Image (cartoon, rainbow, N blue to C red):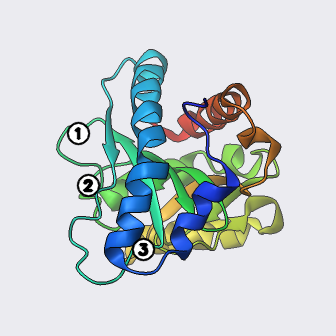
Amino acid sequence: MTKYTFKPKDFKVFQIDGLDARMAALDENIRPQFHQLGAYFTEYLKTMTGETFYAHVAKHARRTVNPPKDTWVAFATNQRGYKMQPHFQIGLFEDHLFVMFGMMHEDKNKAEDVKIFEEKLETLLQLPEDFQISLDHTKPDKSKISHMSKAEVEKGITRAKNVKKGEFFIARALKPNAPELKTDKAFIAFLEDTFEHLLKFYK
């Protein structure tokens, strides 16, 4: 039995119609791994940063009609929530798993927090070629940094800084059949490697 990773069939929960049915499938197929990943990476992040992190598994509690198109576990130093500060996420859409770090539009100090990406722009541009940028965490679309110009990356940072709804995340993704998802060992190795890069932007 695997403890942390996801099988291709797990991604198919997003094809299930109806809020209650999809939520039941998320509870059965995905949230157990999120809780295990939450326990593992709160310890990992504490070791790496010296700070106490809390895992926040998405509850989707406000939904009354539309079933969620994605789900996640987020890591932040605030026990009550994660949206109001820079945070890490591991999550799933139907067609990919994502790992990311950045700021949502709810971040109380977003204009200041986003500046880390300006300060470390060269580091950002030199990330391994499969790293991406997400400018809206609610959408699956992400752009490979290696396919973007420096000006395009800067434009995304500036938008996150100046536009109320603007967001900026550095992300990495895996397809449901990726070799990194075949075993817990391979998956954890991929996640630790990803977090190591993302932590360069964590103050």
Q: Quadrant of residue 12?
A: bottom right
Circle 2: residue type: Met
CA distance for labels 2 and 1: 9 Å
Residue 93: horizontal and vertical position, in percent? 56, 65
Residue 22: horizontal and vertical position, in percent? 41, 69
Circle 1: residue type: Asn
Residue that numbered label 1 is attached to: 78
Residue 99: horizontal and vertical position, in percent? 58, 48
Q: Quadrant of residue 45?
A: top left
Disc 1: CA contacts within 10 A as few (<14), some (14-19) or many (>=20): some
Residue visible at 26% across and 55% down in the picture: 84
Identify the mark nearer the N-term, 2 or 3. Answer: 2
Image quarter where the N terminus lies is top right
Front-lying residue, 26 or 89: 26
Front-lying residue, 191 or 202: 191
Residues at circles 2 and 3 in contact by the CB criterion of under 8 Å: no
Residue 166 visible in image: yes
Label 3: which secondary element: loop
Residue visible at 60% across and 68% down in the picture: 94
Identify the mark nearer the N-term, 2 or 1. Answer: 1
Residue that numbered label 3 is attached to: 166
Residue visible at 41% across and 47% down in the picture: 31
Is 2 situated left or right of 161 in this image? Answer: right
Residue that numbered label 2 is attached to: 84
Front-lying residue, 10 or 201: 10
CA distance for labels 3 and 1: 22 Å
Residue 170, placed above or below residue 33: below
Circle 3: residue type: Gly
